[in-house]
Amino acid sequence: MNNVLGNAVKFTKSGTVSFEMQCVAISNTTSRFSFHFSDTGVGIPLNLREDVFDSFSQMRYDNKRQFGGLGLGLTIVNHLVKRFEGNITIDSEEGVGTDVYIDIPLEINREKQQKPLNPLNNDSNAEKHILIVEDNVMNQMIMKKLLQMNSKFTFEVAENGLKAINMLKETCFDVVLMDLQMPIMDGYEATEIIRSGQLGLKNKNIPIIAVTADAMQETQQKVIDMGMTDYMTKPVNKALLFDKIGNCTAFFAKPA
């Protein structure tokens, strides 16, 4: 859903992006989820529609330089949908817009749900000013929506590592949510600058939580080794996010 909506936002300079979902029980154990994504963006040229799920189609798209290319988003979506024995179809007209339809059958989990994590179980009454470092507009929106669910959170957004560095010089934050892959300056380089002490002692020790789509064990170990406080993968789980923010800020607040 994030990848399809991200493409829709990226390729729609003006107009609308809409999302609809329906769930229909098809048996006692299975339900079918139907997703409809619609935008009034640039559309897909006729000669490229058959290759839209090709991971290299981004190299041949005329709007690549203007919009950043199709990327691997739809390729990943296609693989995930097929893995769940679902179907994905795309209806697009150049200059008019694009409609993406996804149908996925999912089994109903009737097991008792686990007790949710207690958000901010440490120092829960303290307000937290959070810096979101993320270049993807859709991911920014998701993160802001999640953080708005806690009245103790305030936040600002930096679209790349360099912007984050400049904001840390001017504003006091309690925690940084750091994406890793960004233009201009990525999360690794930004973290190195922060941990070097160039931005002052408080920023040198500020909690930095890596928030990335890269779930590789090597990546997790790398971010911890270079000085990030914690690590979590996208899509972001709200309860886990709140728990990590509470834990790392409570630890940071302890006197040396």
Image (tube, rainbow, N blue to C red):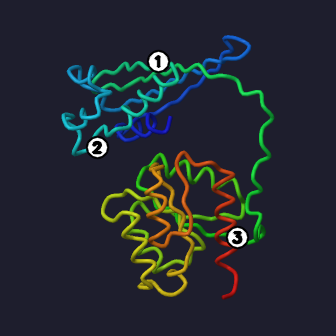
Rendering coords of residue 98 (x, y %): 37, 25
How many marks overall? Answer: 3
Determine the residue positioned at 51% across, 19% down: 85
Query: Residue 67, labelled with which disc?
Result: 2
Which of the two labelled residues, at mark 3 and mark 1, occupies the earlier sequence position? 1
Which of the two labelled residues, at mark 2 and mark 1, occupies the earlier sequence position? 2
119 is higher (above) or lower (below) than 67: below
Circle 2: residue type: Phe
21 is higher (above) or lower (below) than 246: above
Foreground: disc 3 or disc 1: 1
Gap between marks 3 and 1 measured at Cα: 45 Å
Foreground: disc 2 or disc 1: 1
The 10 Å Cα crowd at callout 1, few under 14, some 14 to 19, many 20 or more, is: some
Query: Farthest residue in the top direction?
Result: 27
Rendering coords of residue 107 (x, y %): 66, 22
Query: Residue 19, labelled with which disc?
Result: none
129 is higher (above) or lower (below) than 13: below
Gap between marks 2 and 1 measured at Cα: 27 Å
Report whether 253 appears left or right of 194.
right
Determine the residue positioned at 44% across, 38% down: 3
Circle 1: residue type: Asn
Depth check: give the residue in front, 29 or 58: 29
* Residue assigned mark 3: 127
The 10 Å Cα crowd at callout 3, few under 14, some 14 to 19, many 20 or more, is: few
Rendering coords of residue 68 (x, y %): 28, 45
Using the rendered view, name the quadrant where residue 187 is placed.
bottom left
Local SS, label 2: helix
* Residue assigned mark 1: 87
